[in-house]
Amino acid sequence: MPIFTQNEVNLHTHSFYCGHGTGEISDYVHAAVDGKRLKVLGFSEHCQTPDNYYPDRMRFETFETYMETVKSFCSGGEENEGLRVLLGAECDWNSHYVPYYSYLKQRLGFSYLIGSVHYCQDRETGRLLYLGKILEIGPYLGSYVKDYTDMLSSGLFLFGCHPDLFCYHTEWNKDLEMAASEIIDCARQYNMVLEVNGQGCLKKHVKSDGSTRYPYPVPEFWAMVREAGVRVCVNSDAHNPIHLNSPLAYSFAVENNLESLLVKWNVSEDGISIAH
Ligand SMILES: [Zn+2]
Ligand SMILES: [Zn+2]
């Protein structure tokens, strides 16, 4: 069974289909081929639900076109030049949609699903608030940790995306450390892989002393991951073909001594799994 390293695989990839990305599926396939590094390219467009629950996502009506377009590249062909293309989806955790996510995986030919928490619910209005827009994470930390650990323990997902997204606007403190510790303990308990996410490496957070860091990934979080020995994967989370081959997330993993924890992926006709 062919085994691939983190350098050869990108499993978190978007396109114009999500509504906030650019580029056709074929543009990403060409970017991967031209980059000469990737051997496996997995598309993981933001999953929409039949009732169009998520704002800022492709409409459910378009989901089928997305699936069919990716599938047309999965079977290989000249354009791929040996690149393996997989159909996946990035799902926002919500227990209400578990039967639907299971259905996608079992019946609709998705090779894998990846799990995320992008939103917290406003307690008063019930509205979904995007984490990148919540400046004071304190009141939402509990709900983020609950959703993220429920997602990790659900058994539905290949890995957990950008687990440290909650650090976005906040400098490291005891509360963040406690949240990190719960998430990392859960990942260890359920043998789940956590993702160093390259989309965060394209952004900047200015700290109170004027220095800068990525909003995510955050070194303090990943030092705890290293300490716990939880396994790690690296993806660009590209929303534009020019970011598909970005080395930033991989460099972050190397600089933060995560190399020995990077998983390898087994890719076969049956799908994708961790290589042991
Ligand atoms: Zn996105
Ligand atoms: Zn994503």
Image (cartoon, rainbow, N blue to C red):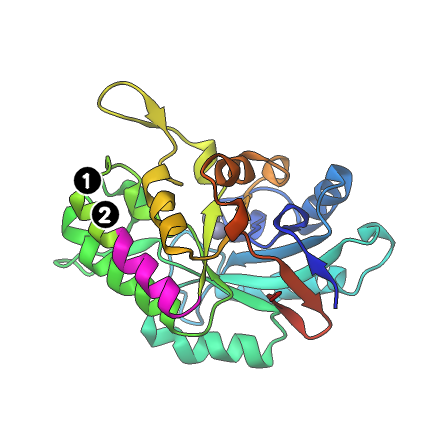
- Amino acid carrying label 1: it is Asn
Per the rendered image, the range of residues in magenta is: 180-191
Which quadrant holds residue 240? Answer: top right
Q: How many marks?
A: 2
**Residue depicted at x 48% and y 34%:** 255
| Residue in front for this viewpoint, 146 or 223 | 223
Secondary-structure class at tag 1: loop
Distance (Cα) linking label 1 and label 2? 6 Å
**Residue depicted at x 31% and y 20%:** 211
Quickly name the residue at label 2.
177
- Dot 1, crowdedness within 10 Å: few (<14), some or many (≥20)? few
Do tag 1 and tag 2 residues touch (Cβ < 8 Å)?
yes
From the image, give the main secondary structure of the stretch colored magenta. Answer: helix
Decide if residue 64 is in sight here. yes
- Dot 2, crowdedness within 10 Å: few (<14), some or many (≥20)? some
Quickly name the residue at label 1.
173
